[in-house]
Image (cartoon, grey):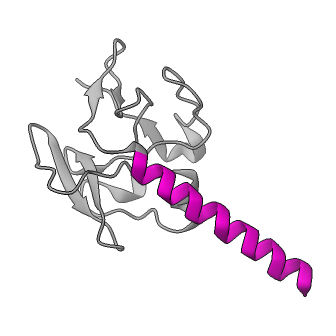
Amino acid sequence: MRVSIRTASVLLCVLCLHASIAAAQTQAPPTADAQQRLVGSRGMALYTYDPDGDSGHSQCDGVCAALWPPYLAAAGAKAQGGFGLVTRSDHSMQWSYRGRPLYRYAADSAPGTALGDGVNGNWHVVRIH
């Protein structure tokens, strides 16, 4: 029992730390890179999740959001162009593109990487058309 409680505590700490890092890194509206992919403020690829659809609601919370951190907007951010804002279940604001919430992928370690494209057939790098 102690091992599982300890493991759960460590996982919870990692998830909390990950959420705070995600919030600190996701302030500016998305932009397009040289390959016409949407990227966040640090040049990291942004993704959409098929189950979200274009409903303006995120279906990715908890463990999902630890691996796929939502691309959060700064307080007072305003929708502009094709970019909008989605209110998450925790009341934080997440950037969206054409009604689809935007996410980063935790395994992307540097600008230009897009390791999450096609994961489980549900995650896709956003491309500007």
Picture coordinates of residue 109, whole percent (x, y): 59, 31
Quadrant location, the C terminus: top left
Q: Is residue 58 left or right of residue 108?
A: left
Please give the range of residues in magenta: 1-24
Above or below: residue 6 compared with residue 113: below
| Residue 15 quadrant | bottom right
Q: Quadrant of the N terminus?
A: bottom right
- Residue 68 appears left or right of 125: right
Q: Give the percent coordinates (x, y) of residue 12.
A: 66, 71
- Residue closest to the eye, 3 or 50: 3
Q: Residue at x 43, y 31 (%)?
A: 45
Instruction: Determine if the magenta segment contains residue 11.
Output: yes
Q: Is residue 56 visible?
A: no
The number of numbered badges drawn on the structure is 0
Query: Residue at (58%, 59%) from the top-left corner?
Result: 17
Say which of 55 and 20 sits in front: 20
Question: Is residue 42 within the magenta segment?
Answer: no
Q: Where residue 59 appears, x then y in whole percent?
A: 41, 65
In this view, the residue farthest toward the top is 34
Give the dominant element type of the magenta stretch: helix, strand or loop: helix
